[in-house]
Image (cartoon, helix red, strand yellow):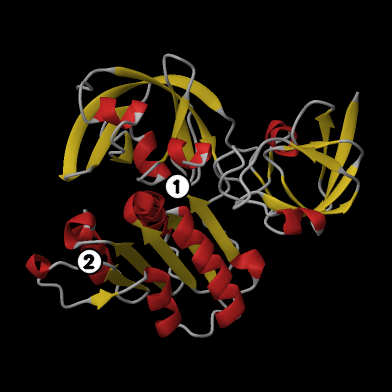
């Protein structure tokens, strides 16, 4: 027996099986509800129930507090409907044009750009039909069935030209991490890795004409890089500011690339790097502090903007809270992908 979920204000509908989460049903129906970790840890999938009721599976209280749940908010990734539902989700789009596929990929190169950042390049199968939107991610399927998620760091047109570029990913080493220890240890060129994707609702809304803030911390720069490349390829020239936050200068592992993009696209793109823990040896003369605070200092009125934020959950959550409360950013124009590690999902 299935139940019906209706989405407002879009009017979209889809069916969910009795034992299926709201998010799972939406993905199977090709409807792009917002989501991130899919494990109840990041809060990216938070929506409000207007009619009906759900039962929540295990989730972290930082993603959904008891007070929020009492007010009708749910995490669609771990909420199972008990009745037909009407939910409010203002970011809904359709993703049916890029089906989710599983495929083998081959490691073509491993390049360390910082002590703890590796650029991993993968070659897709020669007959691949893999399509995605700049900003989306894939999941690596490990031998024991575990999965690890990483955003594509180059634009779709570059990935599809597999003979030249293939797929680029930015991997930060998490000591003790099953996958990243392997990337920084035993992984070598020509290894075969199995992946599935694309996933996620973090991508540029091309139909909009709003000015853009691209906000990244750490390796959250990866999907932001893909969006910039896509905008250049498509000739999208909306006024855009790229803010990239990191601890020290070495963590801005593609700083020169970002400066070059801003120089070549100076009529529409600016680049503002921000260090939160600059060291004397960095000889840093640029901006310091929290990266989202730099945005607020430069753009105290965000009411006409769109924001695309990717990085550590604490940065994404602070930006969403402060941009809407202090700078008037409409909540529906904040798009985010929080990089939630396996440790984050366990609440450790």
Q: Residues within 10 Å of mark 1 (few under 14, many from 20)?
A: many
Circle number at residue 37: none
Tell me what residue is drawn at x 27 percent, y 33 percent. 121
Q: Which mark is residue 259?
A: 2
Give percent across and percent down for residue 176.
31, 31
Dot 2 or dot 1: first in sequence order is 2
* Residue 43 in the image, given as x and y percentages of width and height: 61, 51
| Front position in the image: 289 or 333 | 289
**Count of residue discs:** 2
Say left or right for 326 vs 246: right
Tell me which residue sits at (55%, 81%) in the image: 327
Drawn side of residue 220 relative to residue 23, left or right = left
Label 2 sits on a secondary structure element that is: helix
Q: Where residue 55 appears, x then y in whole percent?
A: 81, 38
- Answer with the quarter of the image where residue 165 lies: top left
Quadrant for the N terminus in the image: top right
Between 122 and 235, the residue placed more toward the observer is: 122
Q: Quarter of the image holding residue 141?
A: top left
Instruction: Work out whether residue 166 or residue 169 is closer to the camera in this orientation and state it.
Output: 169
Which label lies toward us, 2 or 1?
1
Q: Residue at x 23, y 39 (%)?
A: 118
- The answer to whether one can see residue 89 in this image is no
Secondary structure under tag 1 reads: loop
In the displayed structure image, the side of residue 116 where residue 292 appears, left or right: right
In the rendered image of this protein, does residue 31 appear above or below residue 282? above
Who's the residue at 54% across and 79% down the image? Answer: 302
Q: To which residue does mark 1 refer?
A: 339
Q: CA–CA distance between discs 2 and 1?
A: 24 Å
């Amino acid at each position: 027996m299935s139940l019906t979920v209706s989405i407002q204000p879009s009017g979209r509908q889809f069916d969910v099986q009795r034992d299926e989460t709201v998010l799972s049903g939406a993905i199977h129906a090709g409807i792009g509800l917002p989501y991130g970790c899919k494990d109840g840890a990041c809060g990216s999938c938070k929506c409000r129930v207007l009619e009906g009721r759900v039962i929540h599976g295990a989730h972290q209280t930082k993603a959904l507090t008891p007070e929020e749940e009492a007010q009708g908010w749910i995490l669609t990734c771990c909420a199972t409907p008990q009745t037909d539902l009407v939910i409010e989700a203002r970011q809904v789009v359709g993703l049916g044009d890029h089906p989710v596929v599983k495929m083998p990929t081959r490691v073509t190169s491993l390049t360390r750009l910082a002590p703890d950042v590796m650029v991993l390049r993968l070659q897709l199968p020669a007959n691949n039909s893999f399509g995605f939107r700049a900003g989306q991610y894939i999941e690596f399927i490990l031998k024991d069935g575990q999965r690890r998620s990483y955003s594509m760091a180059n634009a779709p047109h570059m990935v599809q030209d597999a003979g030249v570029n293939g797929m680029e990913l930015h991997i930060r080493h998490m000591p003790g991490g099953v996958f990243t220890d392997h990337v920084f240890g035993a992984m070598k060129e020509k290894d075969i890795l199995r992946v599935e994707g694309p996933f996620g609702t973090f991508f540029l809304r091309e139909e909009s004409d709003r000015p853009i803030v691209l906000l990244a911390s750490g390796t959250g720069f990866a999907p932001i890089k893909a969006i910039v490349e896509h905008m250049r390829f498509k000739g999208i020239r909306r006024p855009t500011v790229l803010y990239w936050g990191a601890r020290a200068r070495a963590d801005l592992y593609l700083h020169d690339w970002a400066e070059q993009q801003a120089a070549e696209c100076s009529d529409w793109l600016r680049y503002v790097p921000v260090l939160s823990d600059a060291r004397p040896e960095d000889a840093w003369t640029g901006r310091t502090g929290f990266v989202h605070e730099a945005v607020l200092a430069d753009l105290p009125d965000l009411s006409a903007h769109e924001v695309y934020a990717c990085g550590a959950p604490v940065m994404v959550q602070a930006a969403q809270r402060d941009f809407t409360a202090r700078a008037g950013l409409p909540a529906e124009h904040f798009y985010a992908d929080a990089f939630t590690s396996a440790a984050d999902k366990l609440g450790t």
